[in-house]
């Protein structure tokens, strides 16, 4: 890529390009909150400097005959006070000629919204932290000049398509898995293609203690809690349908990759509530299912399956105007098999020198249904919850379950226009 001015999207990006819409824009937001108000002129300079170090994001996405392609551009990023919803439209006719990411600020918060075809949450956090480092260097000249983020890799490593690099042509594959029609939350969706955004904060130590008491990892504990909250809002006649939670997996934890592009796939945990089950038993079940899915062998098989389709000659030779609707239809079918998504981005680590300036982080991802993005910073655990539904009964069940066990909960929500 380094010698060219254009490159092909990775195979996950191709799905996002074919399936974005006004509600599910296929974008995500990573935010960092500082301890003092943002200086816009310094932030704008910081974004430009960070982009010069991550030129793979300074592109415009175009349609070719058979695939989309990303073309380098001289268009510069814009920085403005926040005036749009989180996860706005960043690709399509309405934003033609603009970069596919957006930086905004509000009081002491810096927001990075990115079209998911460019990168995943890991790449987004890395880019935001680079912006943050340049910003603080401008704000406090000389104080942080020796600070850097570890593990950024080489320029060629950041730009590689790791799906392509680690595909095993002669490796093992999974048998095609047909997702059963999952339960979907009852009630109407929000009007005018809206989404509602909730930010929930918990003390990390107390949450980990609860997970341990239920003999589960934190991710499994959250999954079980969410499933039970959905069950309590389900009509009895719907309980024969599985509640299926999709969980994106960062493949960098399994492969030696430093790519700043997409590099993840998803695993699924499902349960049919045809009889009573305790929280602890459901936690154990979720934990067992996740562990069986997250072995290196299963991860390799799933990734090989995903990449194999891209290499079939007849798929590559189908024109884009035919391919896009097929990819979009496949995405819609997959969504029918998923009730909700939980993406745990894990712990965000920064150099000690930066901590005095940072209050915390948060994240959201657009959706057609219900999506939870989790992360932790220091002792703060944050869930960015995005819902397309008017019905908030299952969400009240979910949050109140933590509060009833004595956990301190801070909840913020955006307004909805009727």
Image (tube, rainbow, N blue to C red):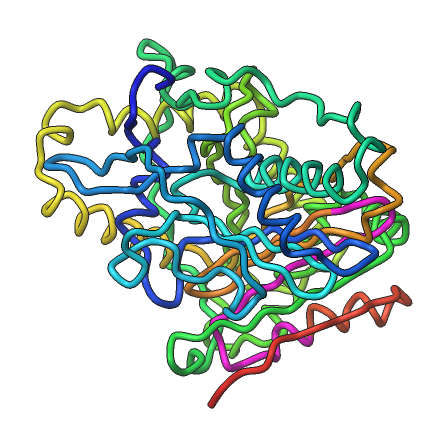
Q: For residue 225, say whether it is visible.
A: yes
Instruction: Count all numbered tags in the image, as a single digit.
Output: 0
- Height in image: 383 above or below 251? below
| Camera-nearest residue between 180 and 127 | 127
| Camera-nearest residue between 168 and 64 | 64
Q: For residue 224, say whether it is visible.
A: no
Q: Residue at x 61, y 35 (%)?
A: 126
Q: Residue at x 69, y 43 (%)?
A: 135
Is residue 193 located in the magenta-colored stretch of the structure? Answer: no
Q: Residue 178 at what x, y percent from top left?
A: 33, 44
Q: Residue 417 at what x, y percent from top left?
A: 49, 86
Tell me if 17 is positioned left or right of 26 in this view.
Answer: left
Tell me if 91 is positioned left or right of 226 in this view.
Answer: left
Q: Residue at x 46, y 38 (%)?
A: 119
- Height in image: 417 above or below 376? below
* Magenta highlight range: 376-396
Q: Residue 48 at what x, y percent from top left?
A: 53, 40
Is residue 380 located in the magenta-colored stretch of the structure? Answer: yes
Q: Residue at x 50, y 31 (%)?
A: 52
Q: Quadrant of residue 384?
A: bottom right
């Amino acid at each position: 890529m380094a010698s060219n001015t254009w490159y092909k999207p990775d195979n996950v990006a191709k799905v996002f390009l074919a399936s974005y819409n006004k509600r599910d824009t296929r974008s995500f937001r990573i935010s960092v909150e500082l301890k003092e108000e943002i200086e816009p002129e310094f932030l704008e300079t910081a974004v430009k400097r960070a982009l010069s170090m991550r030129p793979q994001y300074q592109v415009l996405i175009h349609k070719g005959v058979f695939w989309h392609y990303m073309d380098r551009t001289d268009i510069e990023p814009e920085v403005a006070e926040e005036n749009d919803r989180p996860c706005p439209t960043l690709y399509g006719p309405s934003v033609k000629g603009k970069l596919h990411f957006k930086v905004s600020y509000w009081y002491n918060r810096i927001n990075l919204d990115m079209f998911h075809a460019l990168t995943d949450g890991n790449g987004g956090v890395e880019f935001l932290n680079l912006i943050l480092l340049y910003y603080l260097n401008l704000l406090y000249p000389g104080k942080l000049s020796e600070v850097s983020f570890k593990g950024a890799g080489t320029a060629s490593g950041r730009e590689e398509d790791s799906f392509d690099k680690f595909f095993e042509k002669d490796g093992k594959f999974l048998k095609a898995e047909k997702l059963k029609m999952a339960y979907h939350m009852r009630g109407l969706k929000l009007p005018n293609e809206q989404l509602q955004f909730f930010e929930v904060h918990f003390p990390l130590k107390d949450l980990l203690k609860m997970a341990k008491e239920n003999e589960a990892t934190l991710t499994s504990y959250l999954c079980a809690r969410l499933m039970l909250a959905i069950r309590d809002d389900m009509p009895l006649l719907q309980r024969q349908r599985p509640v299926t939670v999709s969980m994106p997996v960062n493949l960098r934890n399994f492969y030696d990759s430093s790519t700043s592009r997409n590099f993840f796939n998803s695993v699924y945990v499902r349960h049919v509530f045809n009889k009573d089950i305790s929280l602890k038993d459901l936690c154990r079940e979720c934990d067992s299912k996740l562990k069986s899915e997250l072995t290196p062998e299963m991860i390799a098989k799933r990734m090989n399956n995903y990449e194999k389709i891209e290499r079939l000659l007849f798929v590559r030779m189908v024109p884009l105007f035919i391919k896009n609707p097929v990819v979009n239809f496949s995405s819609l079918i997959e969504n029918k098999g998923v009730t909700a998504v939980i993406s745990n981005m894990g712990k965000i680590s920064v150099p000690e020198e930066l901590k005095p300036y940072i209050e915390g982080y948060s994240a959201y991802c657009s959706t057609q249904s219900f999506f939870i993005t989790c992360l932790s910073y220091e002792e703060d655990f944050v869930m960015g919850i995005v819902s397309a539904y008017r019905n908030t009964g299952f969400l009240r069940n979910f949050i109140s379950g933590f509060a009833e066990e004595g956990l301190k909960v801070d909840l913020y929500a955006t307004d909805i226009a009727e």
